[in-house]
Image (cartoon, helix red, strand yellow):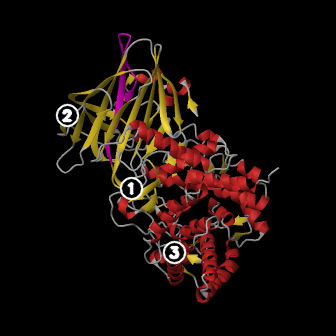
C-alpha cells in the first residue's frame, strides 16, 4: 500500500493523508504524509499518563534536514498562520507506505535515498524515529529538530513558557513545570546541541475546518545531528518513562513479529487489505489502569476518543475474538463487567479520569452479543460462571427499571428508554442542551438487542441448570418476541425506528439503519419476508460504498455533508452522515436473507480502496452522506475496523469450498 510522488509531493494531497501508531496504553503518534501537523492531535509523542487517559502532547513533531554534496536540504514541512508552508520538504518524498504497521517514508536527495520510520514501544510512552541511509555516493549528515510542548491533547499551546532543559549524554531532559512529568530525548548515535528557540503560530488547518482554534506555539530545545552510514540506522527517541528505553532495533523486531502473528490468525485466503485491517485492530486494544491490575479496554477511535462501553462491546468480536485473541476478549469482558452498576455498563470513561458515565441504553446489551460471539468459538466455563451473575443482574435491572427510564413495559414486554435531555442510543449527538436524535420510547435496535440478551441468558441458565432464571428469561423473551411485530411499518415495508415515542402511541417512521440490526443479530423475531424487506429498504435508501447513511436522503431532515463548527457537525452526525461500521451488519443481514456469502462480501470490498486514503491502513469513523462521501470524524475508528474485519471472516467461512 504505497503512495508515490503524485500524492507525496503535492501539499494538498500529502497533508490530507494521515498515519497512526499506538503503544497499547492509549498513547499514540500521528501526523501527515507531508510531515506537517494539521490537527492539534498530531504529534510524535502523545503520552497516556494514566492509561488509557490523561493523554498529553509532549513532542509535537521532529523536523529532519540533511547536508549532502555541499547542500542543505530540508525534508519536513510546516504550515503557519496565513497559509505559509515552510519548509516544503515533502517535494523530496519519493514514497510513503505503512509496512507491517509502521509508517515509512523514503526521501530522494540527488542520488541519495533515505528511509524514515516512526513507531512506538508497546506498553511504554516511548516514540522512535528511525533514519537509515539506503544509498549515497558521498558522506551525508542528518539533523533532527524536535518541537516540544506539554498540554492536554484536546488543547493548543500558546505563548512562551519557562521549560526547564537539562542536556547531558548526547540528549536532553525537558520538564515543563514543577510537578510535570519529565521526558527525555536522545539519539542512538550523534550529539545534541542546545539552542532554545520558540516558533510561533503553527497552523492546524483541520481544526480551522472544524470551527475550532487552530494556532499553536512550540519550543525547540536544540538540534540532534549525526553522520549516516549506509545500512546503519540511527534512532531518535522520545520517552516519558523513567526506565531507559529499549533499543530501537529490538522494538522494530518485536513489532514485526506482532504483525506476523495477527496475520497468521486470518484465513489463508485473506487478501492484503484484510491483513491490513488485522494489523490496525491492534491499535485499539489498551491497558486500563496500572499494569498490575491486568485490565484491558478498547479505545473507541483516534485521535480524540477514549474508551467507550458501547464501542468496546461492538468492536470486541472483530478486534479480538475473530483473530483468536481469546485472552484479550475475555479480559475485556471481565473488565467491563466489573463496572456494571444498577444493571448498566458505562457509556464513557472521561478523559480526566472522572467517574464513568452511564447514559446508555445499548452498551450494556452489546455486552451479551460480544459474549455470545466469544462463546460460539471458545468453550470457557470459567468465564460463564464468572459473568452469569452479572448477566442476571442486568436482566432483572432492566425488567424492574433503572436509570433514564430504561425499563420493560409490562404491557408488551418491550424495552423503553429515554428522558428529556438524554441521548441513550448510539445516535447520541448533543450540543449544549440540544439533543438532535433523542429517540425516547422503544427504539428498534434496543429491542433487537434486548431479545438477543434474553436468548443468551436463557441458554446459559439452562447450561448452568438454573431453571428459575431460565423460565424467567423465557417468559420475557416470549412476550417481547410476540410484540416485536409492532415495529413493522406496512406502509413503507420496513421497520419503525421508534415506537411509542415519548411514552405515547405515535411511531417514528424515519428510515434509519438501526433496523438492520434486527436482521443481523443472531436471534430475530421477524418472519423471513419482513427480514428481506428490511435489507432491501436499507439497500435502496441508505447503502453507500463506505457504509450506511444514518437517515434516508428522501427525509426532509437529511443533511448530506458533515462540516462546519461543533453545532453544525453534531446536527448532521446522525441525520444522513454515513457510518462505516454498519457495513458489517448490512453484509451479514444480506447474507442471512439471500444466502450468497460471496455476494455479501462485495458490500464491504470498497473499504480496500479507502485504506489508501485518510489515515493510511485504517477505517474512518464517518463519511459524508452525499457523494463523493468524503471521510470525516475520527480517522481511525475501532468498530469500523472491527465490524468489517469480522464480517469478512464470517462470510469467508460461509463460502462453499470447491
Q: CA distance from mark 2 to mark 1?
A: 30 Å
The label number, if any, that marks residue 571 in the structure image: none
Pointer 3 local density, CA inside 10 Å: few below 14, some 14–19, many at least 20: some
Q: Nearer the viewer, residue 485 or 320?
A: 320
User: Crowding at label 1, few (<14), some or many (≥20) Cα neighbours within 10 Å?
Assistant: many
- Residue 188 placed where, x, y %? 33, 32
Q: Is residue 274 above or below residue 407?
A: above
Callout 3–callout 2 Cβ contact below 8 Å: no
Residue at far top of view: 70
Q: Which residue is mark 3?
A: 387
Q: CA distance from mark 3 to mark 2?
A: 53 Å
Residue annotated with mark 1: 52
SS category of the residue bearing label 3: helix
* Mark 2 / mark 1, whichever is N-terminal: 1
| Earlier sequence position, callout 3 versus callout 2 | 2
Q: Nearer the viewer, residue 234 or 453?
A: 234
Quarter residue 28 falls in? top left
Q: Residue 258 at what x, y percent from top left?
A: 51, 46
Q: Residue furthest bottom?
A: 468
- What residue sits right under mark 2 in the picture? 167
Which element carries disc 1, helix, strand or loop? loop
Q: What secondary structure is found at the residue carrying circle 2?
A: strand
Q: Position of residue 453 (x, y in %)?
A: 59, 74
Magenta stretch encompasses residue 175: no
Left or right, 281 with respect to 547, comes to left
Nearer to me, 124 or 438 = 124
Amino acid at each position: 500500500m504505497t503512495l508515490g510522488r503524485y500524492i507525496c509531493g503535492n501539499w494538498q494531497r500529502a497533508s490530507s493523508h494521515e498515519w497512526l501508531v499506538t503503544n497499547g496504553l492509549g498513547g499514540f503518534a500521528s501526523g501527515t504524509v507531508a510531515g506537517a501537523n494539521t490537527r492539534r492531535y498530531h504529534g510524535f509523542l502523545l503520552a497516556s499518563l494514566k492509561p488509557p487517559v490523561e493523554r498529553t502532547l509532549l513532542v509535537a513533531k521532529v523536523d529532519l534536514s540533511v547536508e549532502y554534496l555541499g547542500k542543505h536540504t530540508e525534508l519536513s514541512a510546516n504550515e503557519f498562520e496565513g497559509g505559509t508552508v515552510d519548509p516544503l520538504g515533502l517535494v523530496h518524498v519519493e514514497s510513503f507506505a505503512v509496512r507491517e504497521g509502521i509508517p515509512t517514508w523514503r526521501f530522494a536527495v540527488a542520488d541519495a535515498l533515505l528511509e524514515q520510520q516512526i513507531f512506538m514501544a508497546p506498553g511504554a510512552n516511548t516514540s522512535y524515529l528511525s533514519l537509515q541511509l539506503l544509498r549515497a555516493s558521498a558522506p551525508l549528515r542528518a539533523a533532527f529538530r524536535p518541537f516540544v510542548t506539554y498540554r492536554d491533547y484536546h488543547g493548543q499551546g500558546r505563548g512562551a513558557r519557562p521549560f526547564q532543559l537539562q542536556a547531558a549524554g548526547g540528549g536532553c531532559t525537558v520538564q515543563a513545570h514543577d510537578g510535570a512529568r519529565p521526558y527525555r530525548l536522545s539519539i542512538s548515535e550523534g550529539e545534541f546541541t542546545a539552542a532554545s528557540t520558540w516558533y510561533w503560530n503553527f497552523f492546524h488547518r483541520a481544526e480551522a475546518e472544524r470551527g475550532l482554534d487552530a494556532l499553536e506555539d512550540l519550543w525547540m530545545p536544540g538540534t540532534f545531528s549525526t553522520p549516516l552510514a549506509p545500512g546503519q540506522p540511527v534512532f531518535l527517541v522520545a520517552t516519558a518513562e523513567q526506565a531507559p528505553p529499549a533499543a530501537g532495533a529490538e522494538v522494530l523486531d518485536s513489532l514485526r513479529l506482532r504483525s506476523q502473528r495477527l496475520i497468521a490468525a486470518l484465513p489463508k485466503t485473506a487478501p492484503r487489505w484484510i491483513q491490513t485491517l488485522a494489523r490496525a485492530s491492534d491499535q485499539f486494544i489498551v491497558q486500563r489502569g496500572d499494569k498490575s491490575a491486568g485490565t484491558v479496554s478498547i479505545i473507541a477511535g483516534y485521535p480524540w476518543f477514549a474508551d467507550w462501553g458501547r464501542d468496546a462491546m461492538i468492536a470486541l468480536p472483530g478486534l479480538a475474538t475473530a483473530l483468536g485473541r481469546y485472552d484479550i476478549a475475555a479480559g475485556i469482558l471481565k473488565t467491563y463487567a466489573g463496572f456494571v452498576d444498577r444493571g448498566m455498563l458505562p457509556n464513557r470513561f472521561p478523559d480526566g479520569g472522572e467517574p464513568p458515565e452511564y447514559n446508555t441504553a445499548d452498551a450494556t446489551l452489546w455486552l451479551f452479543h460480544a459474549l455470545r460471539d466469544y462463546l460460539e468459538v471458545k468453550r470457557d466455563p470459567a468465564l460463564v460462571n464468572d459473568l452469569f451473575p452479572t448477566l442476571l443482574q442486568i436482566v432483572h435491572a432492566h425488567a424492574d427499571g433503572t436509570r433514564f427510564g430504561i425499563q420493560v413495559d409490562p404491557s408488551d414486554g418491550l424495552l423503553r428508554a429515554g428522558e428529556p435531555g438524554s441521548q441513550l442510543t448510539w445516535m447520541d449527538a448533543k450540543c449544549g442542551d440540544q439533543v438532535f436524535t433523542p429517540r425516547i420510547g422503544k427504539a428498534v435496535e434496543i429491542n433487537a438487542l434486548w431479545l438477543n440478551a434474553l436468548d443468551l441468558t436463557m441458554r446459559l441458565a439452562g447450561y448452568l441448570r438454573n431453571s428459575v432464571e431460565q423460565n424467567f428469561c423465557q417468559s420475557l423473551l416470549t412476550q417481547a418476541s410476540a410484540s416485536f411485530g409492532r415495529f413493522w411499518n406496512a406502509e413503507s415495508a420496513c421497520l419503525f425506528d421508534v415506537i411509542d415515542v415519548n411514552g405515547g402511541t405515535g411511531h417514528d417512521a424515519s428510515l434509519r439503519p438501526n433496523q438492520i440490526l434486527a436482521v443481523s443479530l443472531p436471534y430475530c423475531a421477524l418472519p423471513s419476508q419482513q427480514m428481506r424487506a428490511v435489507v432491501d429498504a436499507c439497500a435502496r435508501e441508505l447503502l453507500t460504498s463506505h457504509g450506511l447513511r444514518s437517515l434516508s436522503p428522501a427525509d426532509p431532515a437529511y443533511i448530506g455533508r458533515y462540516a462546519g463548527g461543533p453545532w453544525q457537525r453534531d446536527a448532521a452526525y446522525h441525520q444522513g452522515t454515513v457510518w462505516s461500521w454498519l457495513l458489517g451488519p448490512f453484509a451479514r443481514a444480506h447474507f442471512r436473507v439471500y444466502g450468497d456469502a460471496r455476494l455479501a462480501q462485495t458490500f464491504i470490498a470498497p473499504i480496500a480502496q479507502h485504506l489508501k486514503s485518510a489515515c493510511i491502513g485504517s477505517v474512518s469513523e464517518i463519511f459524508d452522506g452525499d457523494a463523493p462521501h468524503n471521510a470525516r470524524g475520527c480517522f481511525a475508528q475501532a468498530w469500523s475496523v472491527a465490524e468489517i474485519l469480522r464480517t469478512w471472516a464470517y462470510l469467508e467461512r460461509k463460502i462453499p469450498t470447491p
